[in-house]
């Protein structure tokens, strides 16, 4: 896939949001596997998943401690940010939501929207996080994509735009029709996904669903409406760019389905993440304050650095501070100002955290998520910035309430 010249256009800072048990760990695990980040598929039930924080899993390496893991997909870097699924960790979810640019919300194809999915969804709404929905567990008895989509529409109130039609159900769930490209994606028994023409027996249903998708998109997107009125249809290119606009503006939620456990649906999900969710260049500049004055910082590597620490972990490598860099460039050995603790800090090492290793970096730029060793005072929520251009960051996309006195 072509990416814009600016390498930041190929970065996706992604979170996976879910109700406990919907399959967040399994989806994460399969993403790491599909992207080649791990080479052995872990299973939740046999305790070999690499994303769970559990000292018993030490020999699985680094990701069990990782607040963010970088992986590669189709020429893009996906920084996968851990978001706890349990309501008891609402503060941690809140912090993770501050630093990601887009999310995949995982639902159970039998249960649909559950109470916790609703609360995490509202939090993501408050932070203006664009989302894709993944209806998981399509292999379970009673799995029903249409019913799950109806519960998303009724309880969460987004405009769900279903871009896949399942092939088979429960035990025979063996593929999906990609309604944007009108191609069938079939999973063989192994991990491989094969692309094929839509089987004859499914063609009429696929065309009807494609038509419904075109109508729903035309209703929401003025550019698509124009083409729809002129030609009576929507071409693949207009459809996918309208889906991207609608997702990024938070006007609609693209819905895909699969069975993470059976490793079905994760590759198309990654394609959708890359195609529809925003890069750091597509999101509004972060806002901060200095001495009561509001400032904005764009994702510009040449601007003064500003970063938010969102997680601190003690690990055998040292004290790792995970940073989302919003502007500027941070280099090894730099002195930064911790605007929250009001003291200077020195950047020891900069690391890109991968599943089984820390890749050392000389520098990291705006839009990126990295771990830094050597910071002593920074804690989750601290702003780190240039000593001569200080500011305290506020949650992006969440305006402070304006109190006006008449
Ligand atoms: P989390 O709590 O959201 O992280 O969910 P997990 O990934 O731990 O999954 C919860 C349970 O659902 C585990 O027993 C998984 O094996 C199971 N599970 C996850 N994905 C699927 C799926 O696609 N199909 C089925 N049948 N079970 C799944």
Image (cartoon, rainbow, N blue to C red):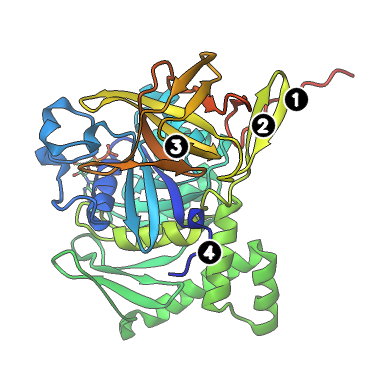
374 on left or right of 389: left
Circle 3 or circle 2, nearest the eye: 3
Q: CA distance from mark 2 to mark 1?
A: 8 Å
Q: Quadrant of residue 326?
A: top right
Q: Which residue is mark 2?
A: 399
Q: Nearer the viewer, residue 19 or 92?
A: 92
Cβ atoms under marks 2 and 1 closer than 8 Å: yes
Q: Which residue is mark 4?
A: 4
269 on left or right of 385: left
Q: Nearer the viewer, residue 138 or 52?
A: 52
Circle 4 or circle 2, nearest the eye: 4
Count neighbours of disc 1 (C-alpha within 10 A) and say few if under 14, some if 14 to 19, many if 20 or more. Answer: few
Tell me, yes or no, if residue 62 can be seen here: yes
Q: Is residue 203 above or below residue 5?
A: below
Q: CA distance from mark 1 to mark 4?
A: 37 Å
Residue at the farthest right position: 406
Q: Is residue 331 above or below residue 77?
A: above
Q: Secondary structure at mark 1?
A: loop
Q: Which residue is mark 3?
A: 331
Does label 4 or label 2 sit earlier along the sequence?
Answer: 4
Q: Is the residue at mark 3 in contact range of ligand 1, meaning its CB lies under 8 Å from it? A: no
Q: CA distance from mark 3 to mark 1?
A: 37 Å
Q: Quadrant for ligand 1?
A: top left
Count neighbours of disc 3 (C-alpha within 10 A) and say few if under 14, some if 14 to 19, many if 20 or more. Answer: some
Q: Residue 151 bears which disc, if any?
A: none
Cβ atoms under marks 3 and 1 closer than 8 Å: no
Q: Which residue is mark 1?
A: 402
């Amino acid at each position: 896939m072509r990416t814009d010249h600016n390498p930041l256009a190929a970065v996706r800072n992604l979170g996976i949001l879910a109700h406990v048990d919907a399959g967040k760990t399994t989806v994460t695990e399969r993403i790491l596997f599909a992207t080649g980040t791990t080479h052995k598929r872990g299973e939740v039930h046999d305790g070999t998943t690499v994303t769970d924080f559990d000292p018993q899993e030490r020999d699985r390496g680094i990701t069990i401690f990782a607040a963010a893991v970088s992986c590669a997909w189709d020429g893009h870097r996906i920084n996968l940010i851990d978001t706890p699924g349990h309501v008891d960790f609402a503060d941690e979810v809140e912090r993770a939501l501050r630093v990601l640019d887009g999310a995949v919300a995982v639902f159970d194809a039998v249960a649909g929207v559950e109470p916790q999915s609703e609360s995490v969804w509202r939090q993501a709404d408050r932070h203006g996080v664009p989302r894709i929905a993944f209806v998981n567990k399509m292999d379970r008895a009673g799995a029903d994509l249409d019913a799950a989509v109806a519960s998303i529409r009724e309880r969460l109130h987004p405009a769900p735009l279903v871009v896949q039609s399942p092939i088979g159900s429960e035990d025979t769930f063996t593929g999906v029709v990609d309604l944007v490209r009108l191609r069938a994606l079939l999973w063989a028994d192994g991990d491989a996904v094969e692309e094929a023409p839509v089987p004859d027996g499914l063609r009429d249903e696929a065309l009807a669903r494609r038509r419904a998708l075109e109508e729903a998109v035309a209703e929401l997107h003025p550019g698509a409406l124009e083409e729809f009125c002129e030609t009576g249809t929507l071409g693949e290119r207009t459809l996918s760019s309208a889906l991207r606009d609608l997702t990024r503006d938070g006007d609609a939620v693209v819905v895909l389905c699969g069975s993470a456990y059976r490793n079905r649906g994760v590759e198309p999900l990654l394609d959708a993440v890359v195609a529809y969710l925003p890069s750091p260049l597509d999101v509004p500049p972060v806002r901060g304050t200095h001495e009561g004055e509001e400032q904005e910082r764009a994702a510009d590597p040449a601007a003064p650095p500003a970063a938010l620490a969102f997680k601190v972990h003690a690990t055998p490598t040292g004290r790792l501070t995970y940073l989302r860099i919003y502007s500027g460039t941070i280099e090894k050995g730099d002195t930064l100002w911790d605007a929250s603790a009001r003291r200077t800090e020195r950047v020891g090492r900069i690391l890109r955290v991968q599943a089984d290793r820390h890749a050392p970096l000389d520098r990291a730029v705006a839009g990126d998520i990295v771990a830094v060793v050597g910071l002593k005072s920074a804690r989750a929520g601290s702003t780190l910035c240039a000593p001569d251009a200080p500011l305290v960051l506020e949650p992006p996309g969440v305006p402070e309430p304006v109190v006006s006195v008449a």
